[in-house]
Image (tube, rainbow, N blue to C red):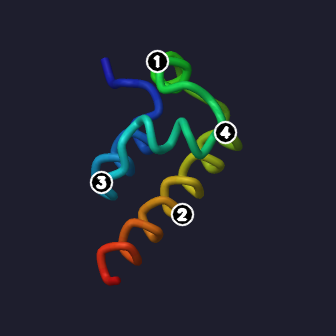
């Protein structure tokens, strides 16, 4: 059985973004994020998370370049 929210999980891994970083960006606790990821989220919620992951990854790239 495939894990729920595979695209979000894969993007976190590929971009090197930690669960706690995404949770902070969403204004929730890391534990809440982990619970949310257990069950398939709506497409809108997943898209919101993917946007946040991209923002975090870009900030991390800028910090490395400085």
Label 1 vs label 3, nearer the camera: 3
Give the number of the disc on residue 55: 2
User: What is the C-alpha distance between the residues marked 4 and 1?
Assistant: 14 Å
Mark 3, residue position: 16
Give the number of the disc on residue 10: none
User: What is the C-alpha distance between the residues marked 2 and 1?
Assistant: 23 Å
Residue at image coords 29%, 47%: 13
Residue at image coords 41%, 77%: 62
Residue at image coords 48%, 26%: 30
Residue at image coords 55%, 25%: 29
Give the number of the disc on residue 38: 1
User: Viewer-proximal residue, 6 or 28?
Assistant: 28
Q: Secondary structure at mark 3?
A: loop
Mark 1 touches mark 3? (CB < 8 Å): no
Name the quadrant containing residue 44: top right
| Quadrant (top left, top right, bottom left, bottom right) of the C terminus | bottom left
User: What is the C-alpha distance between the residues marked 1 and 3?
Assistant: 20 Å
Badge 3 or badge 2: first in the primary sequence: 3
Crowdedness near tag 4: few (<14), some (14–19) or many (≥20) residues, C-alpha within 10 Å: few
Vertical placement of 14 versus 25: above or below? below
Q: Position of residue 21 (x, y in %)?
A: 46, 44
Mark 4, residue position: 45
Q: Position of residue 50 (x, y in %)?
A: 54, 52
Label 2 vs label 4, nearer the camera: 2
Badge 4 or badge 3: first in the primary sequence: 3
User: Horizontally, is 60 left or right of 24 in the view?
Assistant: left
User: Viewer-proximal residue, 3 or 23?
Assistant: 23
């Amino acid at each position: 059985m495939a894990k729920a929210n595979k695209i979000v999980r894969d993007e976190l891994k590929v971009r090197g973004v930690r669960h706690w970083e995404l949770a902070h960006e969403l204004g929730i606790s890391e534990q809440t994020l982990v619970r949310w990821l257990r069950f398939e989220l709506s497409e809108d919620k997943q898209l919101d998370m993917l946007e946040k992951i991209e923002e975090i990854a870009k900030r991390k790239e800028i910090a490395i370049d400085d």
